[in-house]
Image (cartoon, grey):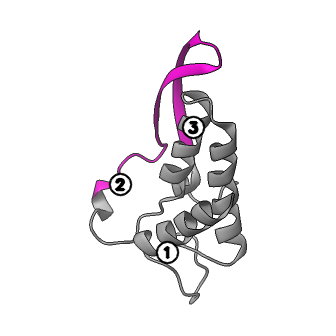
Amino acid sequence: MLTGSLGNLPSATLGAREDGPRRFGLYEPISGSAPDIAGQGIANPIAAILSAALLCRYSLGDEATAARIEGAVERAVRRGARTRDLARGGDSYLSTIEFTESVLADVLTAR
């Protein structure tokens, strides 16, 4: 798997263009809701976060916000932020909430 984890893949099901560049869409992580690990704080939130970027781009027509979200995820990973599924061997990892907060802090400060 080139992405490193199924938890890294966003998805969008898009309708026809009806309002200029905007489209109706359904946005979700390709992996679904991961009910088998619900409430454990170990789910990888990257796909859900990147699905929000797709929503901004395709349904809201907001390329700038989409790019900010995508950039924040990339910077978090480059800084070494990892969820359990991405950590190697004995490397430390962040909980779902910690990773999300790391990305969110970056989105809010990157203007």
Q: Position of residue 101 (x, y in %)?
A: 48, 70
Residue labelled with disc 3 = 56
**Number of residues whose C-alpha sits closer than 10 Å to that of mark 1, classed few (under 14), some (14–19) or many (20 or more):** some
Q: Secondary structure at mark 2?
A: loop
Q: Secondary structure at mark 3?
A: helix
Residue labelled with disc 1 = 84
What type is the residue that disc 2 sits on? Answer: Ala
Q: Which residues are magenta?
A: 10-35
Q: Is residue 76 magenta?
A: no
Which residue shows up at 66% across the image and 69% down it? 77
**Is residue 103 visible to us here?**
yes
Which sits in the foreground, 76 or 63?
63
Which residue shows up at 52% across the image and 81% down it? 93
Which of disc 3 and disc 2 is earlier in sequence?
Answer: 2
Q: Secondary structure at mark 1?
A: loop
Dot label at residue 75: none
What type is the residue that disc 3 sits on? Answer: Cys
Q: Nearer the viewer, mark 2 or mark 3?
A: 3
Which sits in the foreground, 104 or 46?
104
Dot label at residue 34: 2
In the displayed structure, 105 sits above or below 21; it is below
